[in-house]
Amino acid sequence: MPVGQPIWLPFLIPSSYSTAPLARKTSRILVYIDGFNLYYGAIKGGSHKWLNLEKYFQKLRNNDDIKRIYYFTARVSGPSEKNQAAYLEALATLSLVEVRLGRFKFKSVKCRVRACTFAGWKLFKSPEEKQTDVAIGIQMVVDAFDDNCDRFVLVTADSDLLPAIRTIKLRFPKKEIILYVPATSTIRGAATELRGAADKDKTLPLDLLRHCHLPARVPDGAGGFIEKPAAW
């Protein structure tokens, strides 16, 4: 045999060897939900308030590896306070969901009803949600720099998230940002700037909501149960 002639030894190749390309690994994703955007855009007035966020996004992104679902909101006061508290407790039992709480701040708002004939002081106190958009943006940027995911799934219609999206795309162009706009109307669902900044944008699928409710009685992990509010 000439020197340098390659030797073919087929018996040394394992029988399980395959020349087929390896399957693409599942993408790591993180989900960021603007709670009030989700509520007012897709939940309010319907029968899906007792939503299992973990189940919903596992169905929605069934080919991805969900590492964490961040739910950003603030505690309300008044008639809905107990209902929201029960829901937040129920969400806390889900292994993938992490609730992040902001706060409300009261600000003075001037009455703009032109037909109003009231002669007195026309300023009134109105609650305004604070910190949510900033908290979401910071968390997204931190996760990008720490390489905690390959894809960001963002649920909001708030254009205040534009700086965070643009920063991530500038510094980490290979990371994908997928936007889901929660909306039941075309006007609310426009979100033109936000959609334009994301790699992919969709309106949040509403038909899937009815398949993803929490049980009416959620075990609290301490021998008791968290009851679904009667009005929900």
Image (cartoon, grey):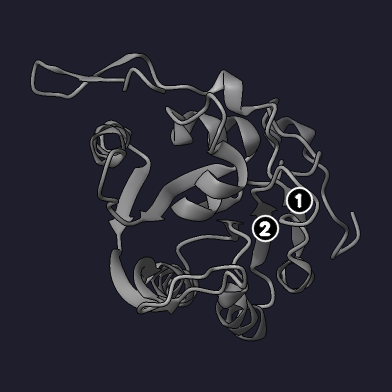
Q: In this view, does 231 lie to the left or right of 202?
A: left
Q: In this view, does 85 lie to the left or right of 94?
A: left
- Locate the C terminus by quadrant: top left
Q: Where is residue 142 in the image (x, y as percent from the top left)?
A: 41, 75
Q: Where is residue 8 in the image (x, y as percent from the top left)?
A: 83, 43
Q: In this view, does 159 lie to the left or right of 108?
A: right
Q: Is residue 32 visible?
A: no
Mark 1 touches mark 2? (CB < 8 Å)? yes
What residue appears at the point 47 percent right and 22 percent down from the top-left corner?
213
Q: Where is residue 209 in the image (x, y as percent from the top left)?
A: 59, 28
What residue appears at the point 9 percent right and 16 percent down from the top-left corner?
223
Q: Can residue 41 be seen in this view?
A: yes
Which mark is on residue 202? 1
Q: Nearer the viewer, residue 210 or 22?
A: 210
What residue appears at the point 25 percent right and 50 percent down from the top-left corner?
77
Residue 162, by quadrant, is: bottom right
Question: Against 21, is 165 above or below?
Answer: below
Q: In this view, does 196 lie to the left or right of 46?
A: right
Other residues around mark 1 within 10 Å, as few (<14) / some (14–19) / many (≥20): few
Location of mark 2 (residue): 179
Other residues around mark 2 within 10 Å, as few (<14) / some (14–19) / many (≥20): many
What residue appears at the point 47 percent right and 53 percent down from the top-left corner?
36
Question: Against 47, is 150 above or below?
Answer: below
Label 1 element class: strand
Residue 21, by quadrant, is: top right
Label 2 element class: strand
Disc 1 marks a residue whose amino acid type is Lys
Q: Where is residue 106 in the image (x, y as percent from the top left)?
A: 30, 71
Disc 2 marks a residue whose amino acid type is Leu
Q: Which callout, 1 or 2, points at the residue further toward the start of the chain?
A: 2
Question: Against 49, is 124 above or below?
Answer: below
Which mark is on residue 224? none
